[in-house]
């Protein structure tokens, strides 16, 4: 094992180490009890909302965001062009603006998003881009959040005219 902790080792001496029997030998330290309880609450919440309703909400937000982004010049959207063909994530670039600059300006406007490689440098190499900006939408987002995102994108365009 890479990490050691209580209960996974039966005995330690100057001569050697004896590990506990499985599964204990693979479980270093206290198990993530709070996280398991939180996961259960999260699953209950999602089931109560209904996965179909969540998907519908995500699709509406992404559809609206794609429509509004399409009105802004010099934006390249990566992936499918319709909400029905994609998840609730939009990766894009603004011509002449680094994705980190996009993320920084939107952050100053209270919009949380990401800029960079998104753990997929080989894809960025294939696309021949240094990175991408990425906006994600979910059940806790609203149309007003998308409007704030679009206002932020317009501000980026103003700053980098």
Image: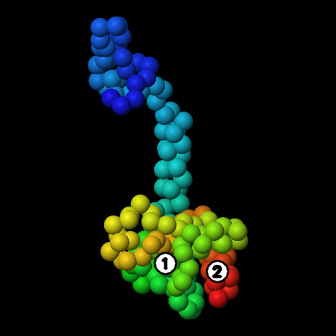
Position above or below: 17 against 58: above
Residue at figure coordinates x 48%, y 50% from the top left: 43
Residue 84, quarter of picture = bottom left
Identify the mark nearer the N-term, 2 or 1.
1
User: Which residue position holds label 2?
Assistant: 156
Residue 84 can be seen in this image: no
- For the C terminus, give its image quadrant: bottom right
Residues packed near mark 1 inside 10 Å, few (<14), some (14 to 19) or many (20 plus): some
Q: How many marks?
A: 2
- For the N terminus, give its image quadrant: top left
Residue 99 can be seen in this image: yes
Residues packed near mark 2 inside 10 Å, few (<14), some (14 to 19) or many (20 plus): some
Residue at figure coordinates x 63%, y 76% from the top left: 149
Q: Which mark is residue 144?
A: none
Position above or below: 35 against 4: below
User: Which residue position holds label 1?
Assistant: 92
* Residue 16 percent across, percent down from the top left: 29, 11
* Residue 73 percent across, percent down from the top left: 55, 92
- Label 2: state its secondary structure: helix
């Amino acid at each position: 094992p890479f990490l050691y902790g209580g209960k996974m080792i039966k005995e330690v001496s100057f001569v050697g180490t004896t590990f506990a029997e499985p599964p204990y030998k693979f479980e270093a330290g206290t198990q993530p009890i709070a996280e398991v309880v939180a996961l259960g609450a999260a699953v209950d919440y999602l089931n109560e909302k209904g996965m179909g309703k969540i998907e519908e909400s995500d699709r509406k937000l992404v559809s609206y965001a794609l429509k509004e982004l399409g009105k802004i010049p010099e934006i390249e959207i990566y992936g499918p062009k319709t909400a029905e063909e994609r998840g609730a994530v939009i990766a894009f670039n603004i011509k002449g603006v680094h994705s980190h600059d996009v993320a920084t300006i939107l952050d100053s406007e209270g919009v949380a998003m990401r800029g960079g490689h998104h753990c997929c440098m080989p894809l960025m190499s294939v696309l021949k881009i240094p990175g991408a900006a990425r906006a994600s939408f979910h059940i806790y987002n609203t149309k007003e959040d998308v409007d704030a995102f679009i206002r932020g994108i317009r501000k980026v365009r103003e700053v980098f005219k």
